[in-house]
Amino acid sequence: MDPAICHGKPTIRGSRLLVTAILELLVSGMTWNEILADYPSLEIDDIQECLNYAI
């Protein structure tokens, strides 16, 4: 988290992609592969870390 990026909300590796956005996509039913296709800068480990953050 960086107060200068997205008002300090958790983001993925310093990007402006919010962890909560990825979690919302997962809850909506998107698969990991669909998310990775939509966000080419993401890696599988990024999605796993989003889930780790949620628990």
Image (cartoon, rainbow, N blue to C red):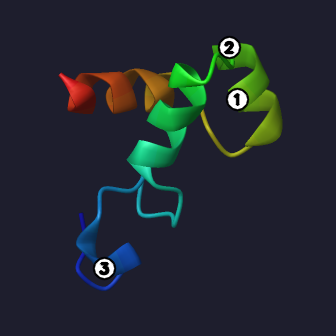
Left or right: where does residue 34 sit relative to residue 31?
right
Q: Which residue is mark 3?
A: 7
Reply above or below: 43 against 10: above
Mark 2 residue element = loop
Residues tagged 1 and 2 counted as in contact (Cβ below 8 A): yes
| Observer-nearest of 26 and 10 | 26
Left or right: where does residue 5 sit relative to residue 46?
left
- Look at 25% across and 29% down and name the residue there: 54
Spatial separation of the CA atoms under disc 3 and disc 2: 28 Å
Which quadrant, please, contains the C terminus?
top left
Q: In the rendered structure, which amino acid carries the disc numbered 3?
A: His
Reply above or below: 51 against 6: above
Pick whichever of labels 3 and 2 is earlier in the sequence. 3
Where residue 12 sits in the image (x, y, percent)? 43, 50
Q: In the rendered structure, which amino acid carries the disc numbered 1?
A: Ile
Where residue 46 sits in the image (x, y, percent)? 47, 33
Where residue 45 sits in the image (x, y, percent)? 46, 24
Spatial separation of the CA atoms under disc 3 and disc 1: 24 Å
Q: Which residue is mark 2?
A: 31
- Look at 72% across and 29% down and name the residue there: 36
Tell me if mark 2 has few (under 14), some (14-19) or many (20+) residues whose alpha carbon lies within 10 angstroms of its own: few
Residue 1: name its quadrant. Answer: bottom left
User: Looking at the image, which residue sits at the far left?
Assistant: 55
Q: How many marks?
A: 3
Tell me if mark 3 has few (under 14), some (14-19) or many (20+) residues whose alpha carbon lies within 10 angstroms of its own: few
- Look at 25% across and 72% down and name the residue there: 8
Q: Which residue is mark 1?
A: 35
| Observer-nearest of 27 and 43 | 27
Residue 50: name its quadrant. Answer: top left
